Image: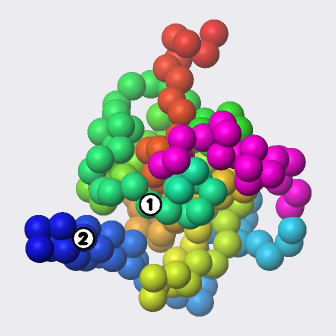
Amino acid sequence: MKVYTLLISVFILISSCHTAHTTEKNILPPQTQTTTMPITPEPKTEEQWKQVLTAEEYRVLREAGTEAPYTGKYTNLDEKGNYYCKACGNLLFSSDTKYHSGCGWPAFYDIANGDAVITREDNSHGMKRIEVLCKKCHSHLGHVFPDGPQDKTGIRYCINSISLDFKTDSTQK
């Protein structure tokens, strides 16, 4: 019964964080507009991904899973540096655009460069959301919402910690 109650609580928390409803207007900046155009991902088979990712990394990155809120190692990290795709090493986000949104996952108001991610419509779990994927390998990173800091982009990239690798400024040199 405790497990069932915990699962219901997590689902409610995820729903409340992820249900920032999008309207018909496009909420994303031009460089990250949702696309239906095929972009060729890094050429690895799913079997090869299973060999380089842990089971949990594979579930989130390749099967569009979600880690439990407030459990990711980067949710409260405040160090200066960059966040890279855990699967392929593509530069995704900078700590300069990270902020505490209170949603339980790392949040960023912008991407590191204009072509780091792609997005697509996600209607899973009875919600209408915009999924964020690594442009290089098409791994699932999280979702993007129009409730970010209004003095910045107004965008909140809500990203799974397990989808990221962080390198401090000192380790990048």
Find numbered disc 1 in the image and state the secondary structure of the residue it sits on: loop
Amino acid type, callout 1: Thr
Front-most of residues 110 and 161? 161
Q: What residue appears at the point 52 percent right and 47 percent down from the top-left corner?
A: 55
Residue 20 in view, yes or no: yes
Residue 35 is situated, as x and y percent measured from the top left of the image, at 77, 72
Side (left or right) of 33 relative to 101: right
Find numbered disc 2 in the image and state the secondary structure of the residue it sits on: helix
Q: In which quadrant is the N terminus drawn? A: bottom left
Quick check: 117 above or below 2? above
Q: Most extreme residue toward the left, as rendered?
A: 2
Front-most of residues 141 and 97? 141
**Residue 45 covered by magenta stretch:** yes
Front-most of residues 49 and 110? 49
Q: Are marks 1 and 2 in contact (CB under 8 Å)?
A: no
Residue 30 is situated, as x and y percent measured from the top left of the image, at 72, 65
The residue segment tinted magenta is: 39-57
**Residue 74 covered by magenta stretch:** no
Quick check: 98 above or below 31? above
Q: Mark 1 highlights which residue?
A: 66
Residue 117 appears in which quarter of the rendering?
A: bottom right
Residue 85 is situated, as x and y percent measured from the top left of the image, at 62, 41
Residue 109 in view, yes or no: no
Real-space CA distance between mark 1 and mark 2, rounded to the nearest whole angstrom: 13 Å
Residue 80 is situated, as x and y percent measured from the top left of the image, at 45, 25
Side (left or right) of 70 relative to 158: left
Side (left or right) of 27 relative to 137: left
Q: Mark 2 highlights which residue?
A: 7
Q: What residue appears at the point 11 percent right and 68 percent down from the top-left corner?
A: 2
